[in-house]
Amino acid sequence: MVVGDASIDIDTLVVGAGPGGYVAAIRAAQLGQKVIIADKSELGGVCLNRGCIPSKALIAAAHSYENAKHGDVFGVTAENVTVDFAKTQEFKNGVVKQMTQGVTGLLKGNKVEVFKGEIMFINDSEARAFNEHESLRYRFKHCILATGSRPVELKPFPFGGRIMSSTEALNLQGIPGSLVVIGGGVIGAELGQMFSKFGTKVTIIEGTDAILPGLDKDMTRLVAKGMEKTGIEIVTNAKAESAEQTDKNVTVKYSVNGESKEVTADYLLVTVGRRPNTDGDLGLDLANIELTDRGMVKVDHQGRSVSNPKVFAIGDIVPGLALAHKASYEGKVAAEAISGLPSVVDYKGMPAVVFSDPECASVGLTEKEAKEKGIKVKAGKFPFAANGRATSVNATEGFVKIVANADNEVVIGAQIVGIEASNLIAELGLAIEMGATLEDISLTVHAHPTLGEIVMETAELVEGHPIHMISR
């Protein structure tokens, strides 16, 4: 091992190369900072390697399989449709490799130096970077912490064998015959529905009264309806208690309203949240980094640590939703703040998406949240069923809802459930960010026939003059 005795002076040290860290590093380099980015794992972090990207690749494959089996509505019939899951995994791995190679090229092109290894802080402005081959010391003017999160492991359900986190589930080499999912949140809903489309018998055990808690109940009802079509059993208001596994299956014991029940399946997937990576041997205490009782770094409006102004924190280790795009956004703000720009974090236009079937997306305030804030609102929902494009592709389940301030008709929130909701939400995020009114949207000509017309039609509906539905 090569040990560096003297500290190397750099402008910015970025710890973690996920969608927050690598974006922060690139933006900092663009602004003229000398940047080192360090990560003990793969470039791209959890999102590119073990989360967002591989899961969406498998979800796309599941949709393709389902469409091949059920194309008869279009007059298209295929016989003996099968899945070669080894090839499916090969496709997924190819997507991941392509994306991570892209990150490597971007960092190199922006002259960001990469250190593959671990970081341990020595004091509030120095850190040791080390791996099995070398150990270096960096003295930084600023540091951006982007260490991400990991799946929460419950004591009654320790990961191993047939009890999996999302990481292991995404790497299964065969389609399980049956699967129990503890936790009906975003990850549980997405992966549970994906496996179900491939033919797995899925049971989701959720502790609240509905899957995807936190989303509008009108949205989650449609997702639950879609799940039931593929045979998913959803058990709500349930408490998972224990699991016993053999070399062939796992039996989960749970209770509903005090009544004990159990279910046996090939595998158990536990998706009950994620834990910030601020523990372990980082040495945050030596860097004078103050944490909340949940292990989050306390930061100001620019992502700067309140206890050490040289250190910034972004992504899953600061308060807010654990979203890859939130981390990237915060990374750019932190890099710009370090360079003296007046950038600040503003979450009012931050979208959230669930890649369920149908997809769910939300941005800004819900109608309920707006009313709780004392805002007088006007809101309305326009159905996908009244849209020509949605009807022509046989995807009529869903709606677009827009929430506006009744006093000035400025758009303050939107929720979408339906095909391509993840893409449609961007227009409404822009509307909220720029302070657009309902009229701004309704006067914007949307191409026909497209799903985007639903956004325009919803704005017209909320204004009180819808064209393609009867105003009540």
Image (tube, rainbow, N blue to C red):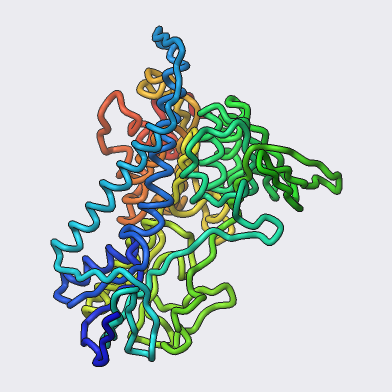
Instruction: Name the image quarter holding residue 300.
Output: bottom left
The residue depicted at 70 percent of the width and 46 percent of the height is 245
Which quadrant of the view contains residue 204? Answer: top right
Rendered location of residue 231, percent (x, y): 62, 27
Q: Residue at x 77, y 47 (%)?
A: 254
Q: Nearer the viewer, residue 433 or 442?
A: 433
In the figure, is residue 224 to the left or right of 242?
left
Q: Is residue 199 above or below residue 208?
A: above
Quadrant of image for the N terminus: bottom left
In the rendered view, does 416 fall on the left or right side of 261? left
Q: Which quadrant would residue 349 be assigned to in this image?
A: bottom left
Please state which of residues 308 and 402 is positioned toward the viewer in this rendering.
Answer: 308
Q: Position of residue 7 (x, y in %)?
A: 25, 90
Using the image, determine if residue 422 lies above or below residue 142: above
- Is residue 142 rendered to the left or right of residue 283? left
Examine the rendered structure and indicate whether residue 257 appears above or below residue 156: above
- Tell me what residue is drawn at x 47 percent, y 59 percent: 322
Q: Is residue 296 above or below residue 216?
A: below
Residue at 35% of width from left, 35% of height from top?
A: 456
